[in-house]
Image: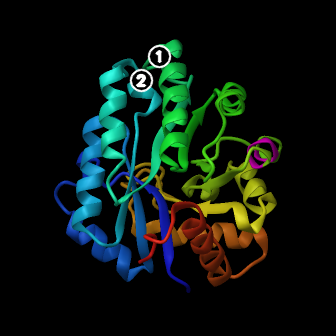
């Protein structure tokens, strides 16, 4: 099978503090050549940059997740902007809206999302968007502020083909996680089949969302082949076909550091 790219993982999460070297070795052994380590607040963004600087197979995204939007200030914006200047940073994220948990007030989420979208445009970086139970407003803000020229991805895609059409029309890629393996997630398999071949990405969201048959366990990049297999089944392709097209898409969106 062609080499794989995990386009969204959190190896900066405390769950990987004790065995990161072994985790990366397992990823290599399972064909995962590169991974995007995604920040969710300022400290995790700085750690993502540090990991990407230390390991050639890793690149970083920096940003403040909607859960942490309550911490958003002008100083936070400045620190994310500074972190984004690293040569190992390939995207701004993850950013967006989450109305399921409402860990941050919705006004704070909207402000942080708008300002980070604008920052991505200034820095010419693609965005990694999180949306949960806020899809209409997420896309409305994207329309209002605009995507950066290099576009972005709706990570852990949260809906079915109708939402996918709207996201695709805005220029977004579709990020497919281990949810595609869950028995009740037919809508995700429908999206995996529906999305154009040049707009599809695969990701783990590790340590979250481990695929069947390991659901409930810690997820990690080495489990990405389960996602690829499910996408291949949904599209009637081989796993090598899906690996090849999603790796090309990852390089198109995130740049030449992917898989380098």
Please say if 182 is above or below 21: above
> Which residue is disc 2 drawn over?
69
| Labelled disc at residue 201 | none
| Magenta segment includes 167 | yes
Residue occupying image coordinates x 60% and y 49%: 152
> Which residue is disc 1 drawn over?
108
The answer to whether the residue labelled 1 contacts the one labelled 2, judged by CB atoms less than 8 Å apart, is yes
**Mark 1 surroundings: few (<14), some (14-19) or many (≥20) residues within 10 A:** some
Closest to the observer: 118 or 19? Answer: 118
Q: Secondary structure at mark 2?
A: helix
Q: Quadrant of the C terminus?
A: bottom left
Which of disc 2 and disc 1 is earlier in sequence? Answer: 2
Where are the magenta residues, as a range? 164-168
Residue occupying image coordinates x 28% and y 68%: 23
Residue 31, given in percent of the width and then of the height, sits at: 45, 80
In this picture, residue 33 sits left or right of residue 49:
right
**Mark 2 surroundings: few (<14), some (14-19) or many (≥20) residues within 10 A:** many
| Magenta segment includes 197 | no
Hey, which quadrant is residue 34 in on the image? bottom left
């Amino acid at each position: 099978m062609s080499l794989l790219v995990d386009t969204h993982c959190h190896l900066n999460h405390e769950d990987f503090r004790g065995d990161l070297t072994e985790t990366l070795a397992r990823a290599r052994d399972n064909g995962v050549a590169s991974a995007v380590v995604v920040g969710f607040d300022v400290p995790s963004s700085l750690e993502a940059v540090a990991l990407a600087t230390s390991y050639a197979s890793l690149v970083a995204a920096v940003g403040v997740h909607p859960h942490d939007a309550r911490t958003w200030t002008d100083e936070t914006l400045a620190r994310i902007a500074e972190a984004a200047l690293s040569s190992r940073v390939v995207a701004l994220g993850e950013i967006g809206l989450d109305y399921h948990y409402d860990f941050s007030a919705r006004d704070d989420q909207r402000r942080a999302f708008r300002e980070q979208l604008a920052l991505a445009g200034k820095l010419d970086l693609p965005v990694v968007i999180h949306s949960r139970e806020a899809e209409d407003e997420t896309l409305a803000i994207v329309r209002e502020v605009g995507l950066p020229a290099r576009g972005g991805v709706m990570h852990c895609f949260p809906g079915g083909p109708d939402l996918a059409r709207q996201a695709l029309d805005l220029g977004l890629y579709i990020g497919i996680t281990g949810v595609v393996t869950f028995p009740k997630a037919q809508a995700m398999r429908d999206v995996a089949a529906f999305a154009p071949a040049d707009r599809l990405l695969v990701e783990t969201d590790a340590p979250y969302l481990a695929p069947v048959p390991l659901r409930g366990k810690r997820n990690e990049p080495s489990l990405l082949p389960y996602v690829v297999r499910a996408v291949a089944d949904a599209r009637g392709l081989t796993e090598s076909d899906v690996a090849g097209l999603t790796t090309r898409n990852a390089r198109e969106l995130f740049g030449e550091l992917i898989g380098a």
